[in-house]
Image (spheres, rainbow, N blue to C red):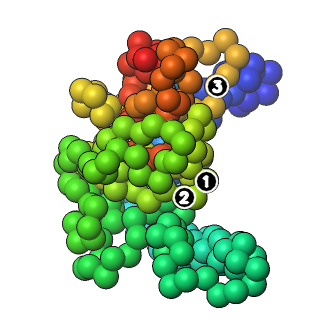
Amino acid sequence: MQEGQTPEEQQQLADAACYLVQCAAQLSTNDPDYATALASQQRGAGYITEQNDLKATGLFVYSPYDALNDPLAAMGDWGVQQVESAGRGAANMGNQLVGIIKANSGQTPPSDPNNELLGENDGNPPNTGASPVTPAVPVCDPPVCTMIPGSPGTAGYGAGNTTFNSGDGDQSASNGASGNGPYSNLTDSSSVGAGKNFTKTQKNNIYEQNMANNGGVLRSDVDGTELVMPSKSQSGVTPPSNEAQIDHIVPKNPADPNTTQGTNSYSNAQVLSRTQNRQKSNK
């Protein structure tokens, strides 16, 4: 069906297909592909003509069976991602430990050389020994599915529109300024610094935390406006005004040259709509 169509038309057809089969429903929110799939699914909801064309083929049907099976698939995917995340965290900690040993000329580092070393877990809150956190999971009453937020249990977790405070506003952000944003509970890596962009991993963690705080819905941290996940930019296509964007509370490149640059610390992040971010600019 995509033969002879422009790239934009092909993308619209793909988005419509994603919406018809609810392509994001079988992925967990901690899956790196979840944000892309959800953005495509949300865009596809508006492509009615393309939906009708696809329905006519009889191939794009979201059955009650699919609605029941997808939450199970999402839970299984969550487990897979947790295992992979733990592996990455262990590798990162090992690399940092080797670096510390080299920096100390081969000597064994002190018992607590760097709190971040112990807290590093690919951007996730450290394990404090408290009761475990139950992740947000999809629950379906066919054909409607909703996200049920996880339960608290680990220090730093907050349900609803909780605002987290990092205390001194400068968490793991040497040589730069940070705000007291709603994601201060997430653990920064040692690479955080002034004038840096948020990494893809950081963005995924922030979006995941935002949706966990808001019952599975992505919302602006300023006024609670419902947002859609960002999609890959396309020439000639203007993103929707409510596209989610992650903003530096203290700008990474302030308009005032005498102002300290903001960092890419989680404590300096907030989720805004595209319109809100453009209005804020580098102020």
Which quarter shows the C terminus?
top left
Residue that label 3 marks: 233
Residue 131 x/y as whole percent: 25, 79
Which quarter shows the N terminus?
top right
- Residue at x 41% of width, y 51% of height: 171
CB atoms at circles 2 and 1 under 8 Å apart? Answer: yes
Residue 59 x/y as whole percent: 58, 45
- Residue at x 60% of width, y 74% of height: 93
> Where 21 sits versus 2, above or below?
below
Label 1: which secondary element: loop
Residue that label 1 marks: 191
> Where 147 sits versus 46, above or below?
below
Report the disc number at residue 36: none
Using the image as rendered, state which of residue 10 and residue 30 is in the foreground: 30
Using the image as rendered, state which of residue 9 and residue 60 is in the foreground: 9
Residue that label 2 marks: 189
Residue 52 x/y as whole percent: 51, 28
Label 3: which secondary element: loop
Mark closest to the chain's N terminus, 3 or 2? 2
Neighbour class for label 3 at 10 Å: few (<14), some, many (≥20)? Answer: few
Q: Amino acid at mark 2?
A: Ser
Viewer can see residue 244: no
Neighbour class for label 2 at 10 Å: few (<14), some, many (≥20)? Answer: many
Q: Amino acid at mark 3?
A: Ser
Neighbour class for label 1 at 10 Å: few (<14), some, many (≥20)? Answer: few
Label 2: which secondary element: loop
Residue 155 x/y as whole percent: 26, 67
